[in-house]
Image: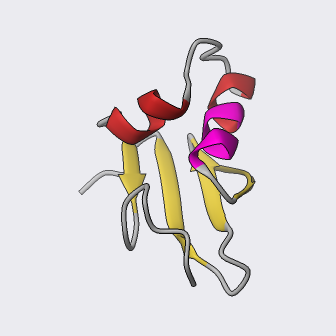
Amino acid sequence: MSEQPIVVYPAGADSGRRVRINGHFVGIAYTTTDIAAFIQEAGLQDFDDMDVVRSKGIEWRGEGPDDWDA
């Protein structure tokens, strides 16, 4: 099974979730807004919170976009 271009890992002890884009670590997200910002920085300027929630191009490891608890 191949990895999606964007991978969001399960929440850590501080409720932050590691985010990788195209195999590169881009930061720790605490909300879907953070993920949208990382994606915008990677070149998709119009990506917003709702795109994060709806996108099939994001692989959510652990729980989905509503889970931010360790």
Residue 15 image-quadrant placement:
bottom right
Q: Residue at x 37, y 69 (%)?
A: 63
Q: Residue at x 37, y 60 (%)?
A: 64
Classify residue 43 as left or right of residue 58.
right
Is 34 one of the magenta-colored residues?
A: yes
Residue 62 in view of the camera: yes
Rendered position, 63 above or below 54: below
Name the image quarter holding the C terminus: bottom right
Magenta-drawn segment: 32-37
Is 4 one of the magenta-colored residues?
A: no
Name the image quarter holding the N terminus: bottom left
Q: Position of residue 49 (x, y in %)?
A: 53, 33
Q: Position of residue 68 (x, y in %)?
A: 55, 69
Residue 35 image-quadrant placement:
top right
Seen from the viewer's position, the closer of residues 69 and 58 is 69
Classified by dominant secondary structure, the portion drawn in magenta counts as helix
